[in-house]
Amino acid sequence: MEESYVLQIKERQFSDLYLCFCGYAKCSPGHSFGPAVRPNYIIHYIVEGRGSYTVDGVKYELEAGQGFLIQPGVQTFYQADEKEPWSYLWVGFDGNRAKGYLRGMGLGENSLIYRSSHGERLKQTVLSMLRHNTYTASDQFLLEGLLYSFFGTLSEDMDILASSETNTGSLYVRRAVEFIQNNYCNPIHITDIAEYVCINRSYLYTLFQKELGMSPQEYLTNYRLTQAAELLVITDISIESVALSCGYSDPLVFSKAFKVKNGITPSAYRKKDRKEQRENRKKNEAKLEGL
């Protein structure tokens, strides 16, 4: 048995992310749910006590401050501890971007267990959801805002516990690479990348060497120079403009770096490409004449 407070949402006005239900429960010793398959995502957070969560044959022993994700279509089972039964809150949700938002926090697939130190804030957010239990337009918008607030609180200090070091490392590297690809044209530094993914420079360096076989600086430089080479081929903008477009404020520094990577200067690279294009056009014209 459990003492629970539940809100079910029957009408939805949003599509990207929307609340399906939420609740808070104090469980009796040994109280369980499942095995069952749910049609949407559910995030549980343990406020007090202990319990276990079983998914895909793997059993996780959990305690207060930890939580778990249930994915749609996946059979799960969870049970309160016999001696220290848990109290937990939960938020059920879905939407076109639900999976992407979870992935952005590091949750999903094999990363189902997490820890957060903001239990009281999460609890108050869910209690606020429970209070807005009408189908008025006002409450619908308030619930949508509270759902995003719940995600925001989790994202502040979420620590993924069930992932292997490799998976977690891959997540950090993926986020760092995305940051580089979106900001290479700006004068960013490795410190900026490390701060963005919330790890120190030393650990970022270790992860890049392990995952990509190069340092973050090498990746950033290679990406900038690869983009520069493309601009030299497909545009006629000046070398100075190419340098600025790829994050180099000093054209001389850019030219030296480009020569180290490609063996020739940017201007020589452009001339060589233009010559090859002319020669290829002549070859193609000759072939066409012979048809």
Image (cartoon, rainbow, N blue to C red):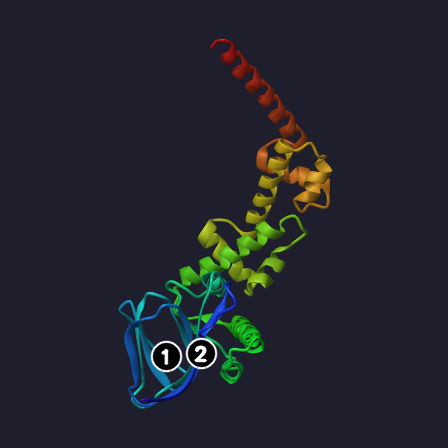
Is 16 in front, or is 218? 16
Residue at screen point 34% across, 82% down: 51
Secondary element under disc 1, as helix, strand or loop, is strand
* Percent position of residue 281, x then y: 57, 18
**How many angstroms separate mark 1 from mark 2 (CA)?**
20 Å
Q: Quadrant of the N terminus?
A: bottom left
Residue at screen point 33% across, 65% down: 73
Residue at screen point 62% across, 49% down: 184
Residue 22 badge: 2
Judge left or right: residue 78 versus residue 131: left
Given the image, on which type of amino acid does mark 1 rest? Leu
Given the image, on which type of amino acid does mark 2 rest? Cys
Residue at screen point 52% across, 10% down: 289
Report which quarter residue 152 is drawn in. Answer: bottom right
| Visible residue check, residue 206 | no
* Percent position of residue 78, x then y: 31, 78
Judge left or right: residue 183 versus residue 19: right
- Circle 1 packing at 10 Å, graded few (<14), some (14-19), many (20+), is many
